[in-house]
Image (cartoon, rainbow, N blue to C red):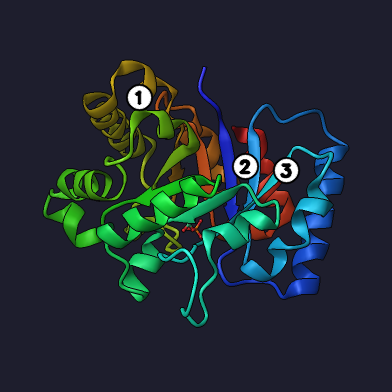
Amino acid sequence: MRKKIVAGNWKMNMNLKEGLGFAASLVKYFNEKPSPGAEVIICTPFIHLAALPELLKNTELKSGAQNCASEASGAFTGEVSAAMIRSTGTQYVIIGHSERRTYYHENNALLNRKTRLALDNDLKVIFCCGEVKEEREAAIHHEVVKRQLEEGLFSLPAGELKNVVIAYEPVWAIGTGLTATPDQAQEMHSYIRSLTEEKYGKDIAAAMTILYGGSCKPSNAAEIFSKPDVDGGLIGGASLKLEDFAAIVEAV
Ligand code: 13P
């Protein structure tokens, strides 16, 4: 059976004190509950990462970054490398979020370099893909997602796919309150799994965790997660509230 995951993406929210306080409240909550049966990850701003592994040790929670540099080291002012992230004890990194693609013009070739560096530095990658509204309306959403995966991810050798999670995040659903219907999510997830199978074979495709992201909340999570190819969620806004995030973990 493949791994179920709920990952919170805090985006650019919470200062150091707020973030560590919130993480401590998550630790307290999850320590008092039976094991969720899914991996729970919080992807925070860089400033929290140095302190989180210590705070999360002996818990089932894991931490992740939201981005990493596309170069290994050197004169790249303002950047944080995959090796630096890993040196904090952090296990995951999100690569290719639509906000990075849109606001920072990150293209598939650059994201491929970041993915390579992350894996070389022993980080697990949550690789995001998804179409914008106009692309879905023009019925080219399959092609768009296929290109993102082919150019960003599918140059990896088969052995590395076990350290990759794919997140399908339709851009029109992110932070808009508009969720993909469970059937729309299932349809794209099944397509992503079939692309993975074409490239890497049945076993790797069957083992690939594919997350849904985009206005996922307690009221819709269970129905989306009930679909056979949806293995959990990448949660933005709702990951910033303990009750909502906990309810979504419950739903998976
Ligand atoms: P929202 O859950 O706020 O729509 O954000 C989704 C997302 O971008 C997670 O990476």
Q: Which residue is mark 3?
A: 61
Q: Residue furthest bottom?
A: 77
Mark 2 CB within 8 Å of ligand 1:
no
180 vs 236, left or right, is left
Instruction: Say if disc 1 is inside 8 Å of ligand 1.
Output: no
Asked whether 240 or 46 is in front, the reply is 46
Q: Which residue is mark 2?
A: 248
Q: Tell whether 70 sits left or right of 11.
A: left
Q: Looking at the rendering, which quadrant does residue 49 occupy?
A: bottom right
| Depth check, front residue: 130 or 165 | 165
Residue 132 visible in rendering: no
What amino acid is found at the position of numbered circle 3 in the picture?
Leu
Residue 205 disc label? 1
Chain-order first, disc 1 or disc 3: 3
Q: Secondary structure at mark 3?
A: strand
* Mark 2 secondary-structure assignment: helix
Tag 1 secondary structure: helix
Up-down: is 41 above or below 19?
A: above
Question: Distance of mark 2 from mark 1, alpha carbons?
Answer: 25 Å
Is residue 62 visible from the viewing direction of this image?
yes
Alpha carbon separation for disc pair 1 and 3: 26 Å
Q: Position of residue 54 (x, y in %)?
A: 82, 52
Instruction: Bin the neighbour count of mark 1 within 10 Å (Cα to Cα): few under 14, some 14-19, many 20 and up.
Output: many
